[in-house]
Amino acid sequence: MTTNERLVKQITAKSEDFSRWYAEIVQKAELADYSPMKGIMVIRPYGYAIWENIQRAMDLRIKATGHVNAYFPLFIPESLLQKEAEHVEGFAPEVAWVTVGGKEDLEERLAVRPTSEAIIGPMYSKWIKSWRDLPVLYNQWANIVRWEKVTRPFLRTTEFLWQEGHTCHATAEEAEEETLKILAMYKEFCETELAIPVISGHKTLREKFAGAQMTYAIEALMADGKALQMGTSHNLGQHFAKAFDIKFEDKNQTLQYVWQTSWGTTTRMIGALIMCHGDDSGLRFPPRVAPVQVVIVPIAAGNWKETVLPAAQAAAESLKKAGLRIQLDAREEATPGWKFSEYEMRGVPLRVEIGPRDVKNGQAVCVRRDLKTKQTVPLSELAARVPVILDEIQAVLFEEAKTFLAANTRPAGTYEDFKSILETKRGFVVSPWCGESDCEEKIKNETMATIRVIVPGTEARPSDVCVCCGKPALTVAHFARAY
RNA sequence: CGGGGAGUGGCGCAGCCUGGUUAGCGCGCUUGCCUUGGGAGCAAGAGGUCGACGGUUCGAAUCCGUCCUCCCCGACCA
């Protein structure tokens, strides 16, 4: 990449300054823009299309596992939010409050939902009477407000979009099973749809959701070596059931509190797509969620409107019939070279060029965004071949990300190694840990790394000692600096 | 919320220190011609009152104050 090209594009190279690259690509690719309010962004059509694709794919999975969608209020009366002590304490610093309605001061202020447990609780209490009413498997797609101090487009914004599942079960075992089922579903979603490999496991008490009994999470590694939480699944135990009096009569005619779960994924996943797959030329979207999967660029020359254009239009039609998201860019005011760079920057997985030579030969030139390789495909075979190429691109992006994750997951037995890895390489550091919150805190203060998850199957050996304090290890944890 | 940087047509910047005619430049945009296989060329145009408010001054993009927003580094969080 020459300096001249860089100047023309006016985008900082990812390899030069990752943070700046991220901030610029979000705007240049028209994914999002800043609103007049601090930390509150506007998701533009190109960015929202990704969310719609994510929603569609996630919603299918949510429903396939027996859940149904519902919608609960945006406002939560303060008295409800306060019912679960740990919950309100955890969220208090970031709740936005409504205190005036019209011209009247409200008798009780209303929280703009930071999460919906507290508004769903009383409804579940009302609806659930019998063991026959269980399980309740609800999900809602909604917006959330958390008054964050530091914000970044998609990664942390004051208002964001998410799905939140809220379920009730008759037994602790069922709730735990649900929690883990969703965690597995999230992992599969990230890997299949987003081409982002994740590690999954449970959080420490220090990092768990306010009010949960246990929090599980999936964590991905971004290109700068920082971890990003991609989704959480909480086993709420009976904390909220007791706070909101959610009881049912079991088969033995005794009243029992329900066992609950809640789980969510957010528009943050779009940030992960950007940071995980992008390169110096811009975005690289996985075909399965790309807003535009194929852009067709006709090469305008000579009598192109009689020859090239009809061929391009026919190609677009045949690809649309194959079920693909297609854009035909036949604008005359932009040159082919300009379009090539533009769609690369915007992360379109495949570009199909059709020029006079191609029409003569009955072919098209396909250029992959992932590897930047070119191949010619007979026009008659486009509709059959392009879906295969898109699958390959999806697979390549996933493989590249997996390789990166593996290469940046390192064991550390001593605190010196631990610190050295975080200073020079980042990524995940896998180390034995004594299980004490004090040690976790100390490590965070000294290295900025936190325990992202404790992965099942990474138990400590009897001889292992805590990487920080040297006491016998309780378990082995994945540490990282995180967003 | 603490420390640092920044806000000037759509984008990227210069001007500010050392106040002074109609605030410049590149890209983009409009029109015409010509071109089109990696961000073409020529010509003619349009577009800003310099983040907001207040102050100093005969005069403010420029000096002072307050506020807003963005970026970076920390403390808190999806």
Image (cartoon, coloured by chain):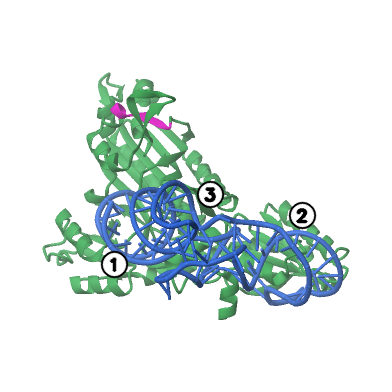
Q: Earlier in the sequence, mark 2 or mark 1?
A: 2
Question: Residue placed at 45% from the left, 66% from the top?
Answer: A20
The residue mark sitting in front, 1 or 3, is 3
Left or right: A117, with A386 as reference point: left
Q: What stretch is highlighted in magenta?
A: A74-80
Q: Do the residues at pointers 3 and 2 share their chain? A: yes
- Kindly identify which residue carries mark 3: A43
Amino acid under disc 2: Glu
Q: Quadrant of the N terminus of chain A?
A: bottom right
Which chain shows up in blue? B
Front disc: 3 or 2: 3
Label 1 – label 3 distance at C-alpha: 34 Å
The reply to whether dot 3 and dot 2 touch (C-beta < 8 Å) is no
Q: Earlier in the sequence, mark 1 or mark 3?
A: 3
Disc nearer the start of the sequence (3/2):
3
What colour is chain A? Answer: green
Q: Position of residue A261 (x, y in %)?
A: 34, 38
Neighbourhood count class around disc 2 (C-alpha, 10 Å): few under 14, some 14–19, many 20 upward: some
Q: Quick check: A335 left or right of A261? A: right
Is residue A415 visible to us here?
A: yes
Q: What element carries label 3?
A: strand
Residue that mark 1 sits on: A429
What kind of residue is marked 1? Val
Task: State the quadrant of the C terminus of chain A.
Answer: bottom left
Q: Which chain carries label 2?
A: A
Q: Where is residue A49 in the image (x, y as percent from the top left)?
A: 58, 50
Label 3 to label 2, Cα distance in Å? 29 Å
